[in-house]
Image (spheres, grey):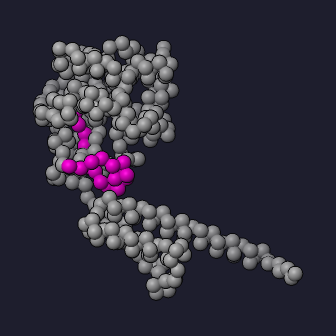
């Protein structure tokens, strides 16, 4: 049998060509998946024509990498140039999608709060205080409330688990010495008859919304109406930082009222934006951690930072912080006020300090 030896130069050339082919195949696969998902979510040409474009794009991509489809439209080089040009145009289309303020919004996110501030006194307009019914319907009610920032007595991180232990919606509740708590929640701004999609959240499907709400509204609906598993964790934070964080929420609503922004499931969501606001007031307080992305593990992250009372283990904390049993008992009592709800879900919780 004849043996053929190749020189090192030929070997490295062949290796380089193989690597380039592999990288090109990887690029085709990843870019095609991304674009087909973006088209599927956005439906820029309507349902029928968008699906036709997706099918044609998939066939074209498969022909380029030689899977199931062989041959070319013009030539190998021309097809590659066509693909790259078409993908570049798709990027221009996608990144030209502008977030808007003027859609037909779901009533839950129809209004964004505004405020007036004089020294430490803040009057917030459009605080959400809906009255929820067992069937999931509600009475719409928006109101004004006035807060003295010197009377903030505590901060609570509320984690509402709706899709397994890794994913939770994060809310922040501020306690006051002279009135009931106020909750801030960063939400997707759904349109009427629009459902949440975690995949859609990657592809500019939803705008961002910041809601200021009564606990009996935005927490109660998760624990008692949607039956999500909700946990309330009192957080250690110095008085000056509590006040500064409240003001950061005011700045965030200023931003969103000035310019609509897109929600992103990974990079711009209810947890990452809270992290950004805390970083703004104390850059050294929160080191980056994977648990900021896997939001269901945020309480564990806070425990490791000693932001939770260390007299209890994390396992004990999950038992203490779980509000659903207390919220169910509240539902059976005659006093159905929001003050009574806030007291009920804090029953038995240790102090943050």
* Total residue callouts: 0
Residue 192 colored in magenta in the image: no
Q: Work out which residue is located at the far front of the displayed protein and give it.
A: 135
* Rendered image quadrant of residue 239: top left
Residue at left offset 37%, top offset 26% = 231
Magenta-colored span: 193-212
Q: Nearer the viewer, residue 257 or 293?
A: 293
- Image check: 141 left or right of 285? left
Q: For the N terminus, which image quadrant? A: bottom right
Residue at left offset 20%, top offset 49% = 193
Q: Nearer the viewer, residue 205 or 181?
A: 205
Q: Nearer the viewer, residue 228 or 93?
A: 228
Q: Work out which residue is located at the far bottom of the displayed protein and give it.
A: 74
Spot occupied by residue 30 in the image (x, y as percentages of width and height): 48, 63
Query: Can the viewer see residue 276 in this picture?
Result: no
- Image check: 1 left or right of 257? right
Q: For the C terminus, which image quadrant? A: top left
Residue at left offset 34%, top offset 39% = 270
Spot occupied by residue 314 in the image (x, y as percentages of width and height): 49, 22
- With respect to residue 31, does 144 lie above or below? above
* Rendered image quadrant of residue 159: top left
- With respect to residue 223, does 292 lie above or below? below
Q: Nearer the viewer, residue 285 or 113?
A: 113
Residue at left offset 16%, top offset 42% = 107
* Rendered image quadrant of residue 281: top left
Spot occupied by residue 171 in the image (x, y as percentages of width and height): 32, 32
- With respect to residue 27, does 121 lie above or below? above
Query: Can the viewer see residue 294 in this picture?
Result: yes
């Amino acid at each position: 049998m004849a043996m053929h030896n190749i020189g090192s130069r030929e070997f490295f050339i062949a290796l380089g060509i193989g690597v380039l082919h592999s990288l090109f195949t990887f690029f085709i696969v990843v870019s095609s998946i991304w674009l087909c998902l973006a088209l599927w979510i956005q439906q820029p040409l309507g349902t029928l024509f968008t699906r036709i474009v997706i099918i044609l794009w998939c066939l074209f991509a498969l022909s380029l990498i030689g899977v199931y489809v062989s041959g070319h439209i013009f030539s190998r080089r021309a097809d590659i140039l066509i693909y790259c040009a078409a993908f570049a145009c798709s990027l221009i289309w996608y990144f030209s999608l502008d977030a808007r303020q003027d859609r037909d919004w779901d009533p839950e996110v129809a209004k964004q709060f505004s405020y007036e501030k004089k020294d430490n006194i803040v009057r917030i307009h459009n605080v959400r205080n809906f009255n929820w019914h067992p069937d999931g319907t509600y009475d719409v009610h928006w109101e004004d409330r006035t807060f003295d920032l010197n009377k903030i007595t505590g901060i609570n991180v509320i984690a509402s688990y709706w899709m397994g232990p890794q994913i939770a919606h994060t809310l922040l509740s501020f306690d006051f010495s002279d009135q009931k708590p106020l909750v801030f929640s960063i939400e997707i701004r759904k349109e009427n008859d629009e459902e949440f999609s975690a995949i859609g959240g990657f592809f500019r499907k939803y705008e961002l919304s910041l809601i200021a709400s009564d606990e009996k509204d935005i927490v109660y609906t998760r624990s008692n109406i949607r039956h999500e598993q909700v946990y309330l964790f009192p957080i250690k934070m110095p008085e000056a930082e509590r006040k500064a964080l409240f003001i950061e929420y005011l700045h965030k609503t200023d931003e969103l009222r000035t310019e609509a922004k897109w929600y992103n499931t990974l990079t711009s969501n209810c947890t990452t934006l809270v992290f950004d606001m805390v970083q703004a007031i104390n850059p050294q307080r929160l080191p980056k951690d994977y648990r900021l992305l896997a939001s269901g593990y945020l309480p564990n992250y806070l425990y490791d930072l000693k932001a939770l009372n260390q007299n209890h283990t994390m396992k004990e904390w999950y038992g203490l912080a779980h509000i659903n049993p207390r919220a169910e008992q509240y539902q059976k009592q005659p006093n159905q006020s929001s003050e009574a709800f806030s007291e009920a879900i804090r029953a038995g919780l240790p102090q943050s300090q």
